[in-house]
Amino acid sequence: MGILKSWAIGILALITGLALFLTANIISSNIETSEAQSDLEPFYTPPDPLEGKPGDLLRIEPLGTEVEGAQSLRILYLTELENGEVATASGMAFIPTAPNTSGPREIVAWTHGTTGEGNSCAPSRNPNPTSQLTEFLPSMIQLGWALVATDYTGLGTPGVQAYLLKDQEVRDTVNSVRALQQIPGANVGARYGVFGHSQGGHTALWTGHLSKEFAPELDLLGVAAAAPAGELTQIIDQQWNTLVGWVIGAEVMRSWPVRYPGLAVNEILSNPGQKNYDRLALACIKDAGLEAEIRMDAFNEDFFVANPADDPGWSEALKEQTPPPLPTDMPLLLLQGTADEVVLPQPNAYLQRTWCEAGTHVNALWMGGVNHELAAAIGGPTAVTWLQQIFAGTLPASNCNEPIPVLPPLPSTAEVN
C-alpha cells in the first residue's frame, strides 16, 4: 500500500506541476503579448465611419522587419463580408526596391496557415512577421515580384475570423491584391499567383475557383498549395479525436456557427471542450497546442465526444467548404510531406488522384519525411520555380500519370452519403 500511495502522490504532483506550468506559461505569454501589441493598436483600429469599396487601401506603415532588396510594409485595407458590408483586413506587402524595367511586376498572394484567432496571432502583428516566408520570399524579391499577405478579416482587426470558410478567405485574398495595386511605387499589374499553406492552402484552392467572381479584373494564373486543408471530411474523420481536434476544432467551433447558425456545438463537444473552445481558439497556435497536449496526455480529456462529420448539419457544411477539382485552365502545384501529422498525407493523395481524374492540371511534389510545419518552407523553392514558369506562359508538364507514394483512402461514409 505504501508503494501505491507514493505512486499516486507522485502522479498527482506531476499533474499539478503540469497544470501550474501551463497556467504560468500562458499568463506570462499573455502579459508579454499585451505589452507588445498595445503600440500597434492604433494602426489596426478601423476608421469611423468605415467608407469605401473592397480593396481600398486605408493605411500603410513600415513593417519594422527588413527584407533585403525590398520595401516591407504593414497594410490595412477594405474587404467585404458575405452580407455585403465593408470590413477591414490587415496584412503585409513586400515590394522590390530595384526599379522594374520590364513592365508591371508579377504578384504573389500568400495565404498563411493556422495561427490562432486572437488579434496578436495575426502574422503582421507577430514580432517575427516573415517567419513563414523566409525560404522563398528572398527569391521572389530577386525575381522582381511583389508579395502581399493577408491576415484575413477578424484576425488582427475587429470581427470573427472566417476560419476555413471559402467566401471570406477568397474575398480577403483578392482584396489584398487590389490594395497592393494602390501602394505608391508598387508598379504591379493584374497578373498574380496564389500560394498558401494549410488553412491558407484551403484559401488558395478556393481562390482558384472564386477569384473571377469576386475580382473579375484580376488575372489569376495558377494555384500553389502546401499541405492544403482540402478534403475536409477526410481530415475531420482522421483527426477529430486527436490533439489536432483540440487545436483546429476550437477555431472551427468558434467561427463556423457564425456562418451556419444551426450547427450543433455543445452536442458534439466534451465538457472541457464546451468550457474552453472559445478561449482556446483565441490563443495563438503554440500556446493552444501546449494546452491541448497537456489536456490530452495528462488529464485524458478529449475535445469532441462525437465525430462532427457524422452530424448531418456539420456533414453538409463540410461538403460545402470542400473545394472541388479546379478547372482545366487553372493549374495546381500540390506540395505535401509524407510525415505530416496535421493534414495527413492520405487526404491529399486522394485529392491528387480525384482531381487528376477530373482533368485538373496537377503538378505534385511529395516530400519524404517532411512534416506539416515545414511543408511550405521545404516546398517554397519549388513553388518559386513553378510560378516562374506560369508567369512566363509555360505550363509545367503534369505528373498526373506518375504513381502517388501514399495510397489514397476510399471516400468516407459521410462523403458517399
Image (tube, grey):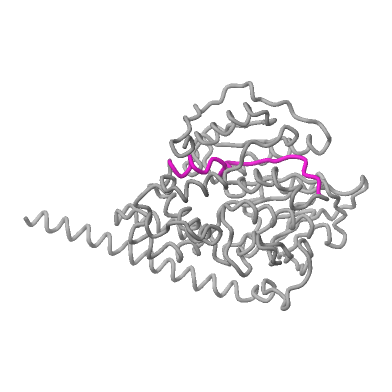
Horizontal and vertical percent position of residue 46: 69, 73
Please report the residue visible at 8 percent of the width from the left and 57 percent of the height from the top.
2
| Residue 350 shown left or right of residue 9 in the figure | right
Q: How many marks?
A: 0
The one nearer the camera, 206 or 29, is: 206
Please report the residue visible at 65 percent of the width from the left and 60 percent of the height from the top.
82
| Residue 311 shown left or right of residue 100 in the figure | left
The one nearer the camera, 240 or 416, is: 416
Horizontal and vertical percent position of residue 195: 68, 45
Whether 222 is among the magenta residues is yes
| Residue 118 shown left or right of residue 264 in the figure | right
Span of residues in magenta: 218-237
Please report the residue visible at 12 percent of the width from the left and 58 percent of the height from the top.
5
Task: Specify the farthest residue to the left.
Answer: 1
Please report the residue visible at 66 percent of the width from the left and 41 percent of the height from the top.
380
Q: Specify the quadrant of the image occupied by residue 355.
A: top right
Q: Specify the quadrant of the image occupied by residue 7.
A: bottom left
Horizontal and vertical percent position of residue 278: 46, 65
When the figure is inspected, residue 44 is found, relative to residue 398, above or below; the finding is below
Horizontal and vertical percent position of residue 88: 69, 67
In the picture, the quarter occupied by the N terminus is: bottom left
Whether 18 is among the magenta residues is no
When the figure is inspected, residue 124 is found, relative to residue 143, above or below; the finding is below
